[in-house]
Amino acid sequence: MSEFPIVKTERLTLRELTQQDAAALFAIHGDAEAMRWFGTDPLTEPHQAEQLIEVFASWRTSPNPGIRWGIENTATAELIGTCGFFKWNRAWRSCAISFEMAQSAQGRGLMKEAVYAAVRWAFQHMELNRIEALVHPDNARSLNLLEKAGFVREGTLRQAGYWNGSHQDLVQLSLLRTECEYL
């Protein structure tokens, strides 16, 4: 992945995050309600969004690389969320997916559109066999989205996460290349 891949859908552009996105990213990641299931505490200072953009960029060169796209609404050129893959184990041909979206953009199928495009891209370009996801059991929207995308529940990891001051159970899901119907 020498050049950052841009993925376009009917309504979205999945593109590299830049420091110009810091304010929009802070608005999303600073919203405690929008981030309650994300797996980290909400951001409290604008400079944390700048640091987060740097962390996402560093994934591309880490020992277990990944990629994180900014999700831009093509009609408005507004950053409405992010999605991507991390913990890419090339030997095992697996990685994990995560995503989040501004509350103002939810409920219109935009994240479904982004996830489907990202999954297609990952299976085509990362030589994956398996994509995993960890989701809080009360995060019905993400669980429904992933299951519609073909992900299968494998079980619950007890107290596998820690944010907002407490341990959190997480549902493990996965999608295998042979199960993906929209490649």
Image: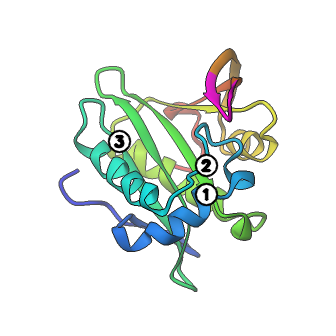
Pointer 3 local density, CA inside 10 Å: few below 14, some 14–19, many at least 20: many
Dot 2 amino acid type: Pro
Q: Is residue 114 visible?
A: yes
Contact between labelled residues 2 and 1, with CB atoms less than 8 Å apart: yes
Q: Which of 49/34 is in front?
A: 49
Closer to the camera: disc 3 or disc 2?
Answer: 2
* Residue beneath disc 3: 66
Tell me the SS state at disc 2.
loop
> Which residue is situated farthest in the front direction here?
45
Q: Residue at x 48, y 53 (%)?
A: 118
Q: Is residue 103 left or right of residue 85?
A: right
* Residue beneath disc 2: 42
Prevalent SS, magenta region: strand
Dot 3 amino acid type: Gly
Residues rendered magenta in the picture: 161-166
Q: Is residue 177 left or right of residue 91?
A: right
User: Image quadrant of residue 181?
Assistant: top right
Separation of residues labelled 3 and 2 (CA atoms): 22 Å
